[in-house]
Structures are given as C-alpha cells and as structure tokens.
Amino acid sequence: MSKEQQKLDTEEIIKKTAKRLFFGEGRFTANTQEIADAAGVNRTSINYYFRSRDNLFDIVFQEEMQKMNEKHYAILLSEKPFREKLEFWLDDELASAIKYPFLEIYIVTQLQSKCGQFHRKKNDVQLAHEVLEKDLTIEIEKGRIKPISTTQFMINVASLVSFPSCMRPLLMDSFGLSNEEFNQIIKERKQIILDTIFI
C-alpha cells in the first residue's frame, strides 16, 4: 500500500469514527484521545491530518450536510412522480435518523450560533422551491393532497420527520424505549407520514 493510500485510509477511519461518536452516539464533547482510541490510531494522527479536534468536527459535519443536500436536490429535481420522490426522500431521511440519531439535535442547537454555515446557494433553494411548488400543485389539482401552501407543506413534512429525532432522548425516557424499539418506531414513520399527507 502506498503512503498516499495509507494516508487516505487513516483519514477516512478517523472521520467515520468521529461521525459515529458525534452523531451516532451524541458524544459531542469527545476529545482527541477518545476519538483516537475509538479509531485505533495515535492521538497525534488526528492533529496531523486535521490540525485539531474542532476542525475535525467541522469537517465531518460539513461533509454530512453536503451529502444530505446533494441527495435531497437529486431526488427533488428527478423526473420521478411526486409520491415516489417523497418516498425516496423519506427513506434517506429516516435511514439517516437511525444511523446518526443525534445529527438533527446538533443542527438545531447550532443554527443560532453558527447560522452562516447553514446557508445554501440561493439559486439552488429557489429552484428546489419552484419544482416542489409545481409538483405540489399537480397533486392538489388531482385531489391526492389537500390544498396547502408550499411553505406549510415543507414545514409539515420536516416536522413529521425531524421531531422524533430531535426529541429522541426525551421520548425514549418518557415511553421507556430501548434504542432498538425506538429505531423500529422510526422505520414505521415512512408509511405513517405518507398516510398523513396523501388523501
């Protein structure tokens, strides 16, 4: 294995481990040594490849946000029927909620203090809104969805998907649920959401 490939492999191992600790286990305060131990590398490797623990955190967070945005736009701008688009989007969102149950919590807690990092390109946002509005209008005209504004529709869907993730610790405690039981509830959300949206 070349030194360059070894470098890339080590970086990837560190990033995957950081994502698991931060967003999978909710250990937002995990320090450099804890990340290194979990990744099976020397602590100095993290500083060598990423300069600092905070920089590593920012890198893996931005990577996940970029992946999320790219997948969302690809689904929305596809030629698939609207219901199929929504099903693909729900599959992706709910799978992410199971893999990284604390990602939504982190996003919400950081919106106020780091709002500049969450800005998307205005052209992309405008195009996505226009496509969604067109698709939604067709569904309403065909009687498959009750009349609703595009903004209210987006808020409704986002709420139905994100609320369980953002409130996961409280809900698990309130209902006495294990991780496995709560993940099963998340898996069942797709059909419940579809039944709520479509007439």
Image (cartoon, rainbow, N blue to C red):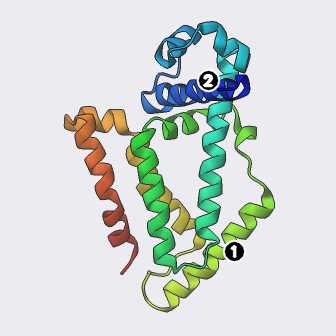
Label 2 crowding class (10 Å Cα cut-off): few <14, some 14-19, many 20+? some
Looking at the rendered structure, the kind of residue marked 2 is Thr
Q: Is residue 51 left or right of residue 20?
A: right
Asked if residue 156 shows in the view, the reply is: no
N-terminal label among 2 and 1:
2
Locate residue 90: give its quadrant.
Answer: bottom left
Where does residue 194 sit, x and y in percent of width and height?
37, 70
Real-space Cα distance between discs 2 and 1? 42 Å
Residue pictured at 73% horizontal, 27% vertical: 4
| Residue highlighted by disc 2 | 10
Q: Residue furthest left?
A: 176
Identify which residue, 40 or 103, lies in the foreground: 40
- Secondary element at tag 2: helix
- Residue lying furthest bottom: 142
Q: Position of residue 13 (x, y in %)?
A: 56, 26
Q: Is residue 65 above or below residue 198?
A: above
Circle 1 SS class: helix
As drawn, 170 above or below 65: above
Residue 152 visible in the displayed image: yes
Q: Is residue 182 above or below residue 28?
A: below
- Kind of residue at disc 1: Glu
In the rendered image, which residue does mark 1 sit on?
130
**The N terminus sits in image quarter:** top right
